[in-house]
Image (cartoon, helix red, strand yellow):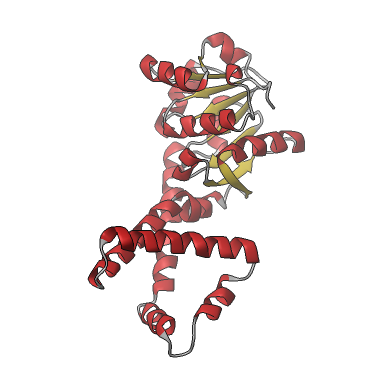
Amino acid sequence: MKNKKIVFLGAGAMAEAIVRGLVDKEVVTPANIAMKNNSNTERLQELNARYGTSIACQQDLDNADIVVLAMKPKDIAEVLQAHPLKDGIAVISVLAGVSIATIEKYAGKRPIARLMPNTSATIGHSTSGATFNDAVTPKLQHDFTQLFEAIGTVEIVTEEQMHAVTALAGSGPAYMYYFIECYEKAGVALGLDVETARDLMINTMMGAAEMLKRTGEDPAVLREKVTSYKGTTFAALEVLREHHVDEIIKASTKANADRSREFSKLYD
């Protein structure tokens, strides 16, 4: 993979997160990464100084093994019409809501992967979903996955399941931040300062997640181990049940997935 030539069309935060992961984990040599955006040369120079990448020219695009679509989703037609891709170049898209069929419409039939990362990619801890078209060989899927793992973990799903991935993992960090916000307020109401309440909940969340990973046990089993009948945890969980929090979470994730489908139709 180190010698693969990769061109990024788009140089925003997600493109930078992927480049950082590829360079830091030595998946691809910096000299083989070129980046291009619409007009912000200063941004490209900044990335070049930071990671050792180059500013892409037409020759880089023509000689690329992989092109990463990282522009704004609404710009896909304009960008790919201005920069048509030669046959044989594979495509990775991180464009939210843009289907493989739409990518094929503008880039032609070629190996295409869609990646749905989340904002934790900026620190190398994204939980991403990925899907591929039928032109992606097992060898290329392995190479793509190696690239994706430079920014975190990846789950291979069908394209239809990408809406669910968006609802759980793509937007997931926002849910976690919201839960922390709520527990911060609850902690303050109980007499703690904000910083203490935040530290307690961040570390509790991290510990619970690590427990799930290490033990492999079902979350319901671990929950039951913490919950003594008529005890303090029991009392709190009863309130959550009375307010049907499980149904609220189902409804919120369904709303997310429905909106994801709406966005997909905008770009078809």
Judge left or right: residue 157 versus residue 258. Answer: right
Judge left or right: residue 91 versus residue 15. Answer: right
Judge left or right: residue 76 versus residue 134. Answer: left
Q: Residue at x 27, y 60 (%)?
A: 194
Q: Residue at x 29, y 68 (%)?
A: 187
* Residue 37 visible within the image: yes
Residue 110's place in the image compared with 212, above or below, is above
Residue 24 lies in quadrant: top right
- State the residue in front, 87 or 165: 165
Residue 128: percent from left, percent from top: 55, 46
Q: Residue at x 66, y 31 (%)?
A: 111
Judge left or right: residue 206 versus residue 41. Answer: right
How many marks the image carries: the answer is 0
Residue 43's place in the image compared with 227, above or below, is above
Residue 238: percent from left, percent from top: 40, 83
Residue 125: percent from left, percent from top: 52, 45
Question: In what quadrant of the picture does the N terminus appear?
Answer: top right
Residue 36: percent from left, percent from top: 47, 18
* Residue 104 visible within the image: no
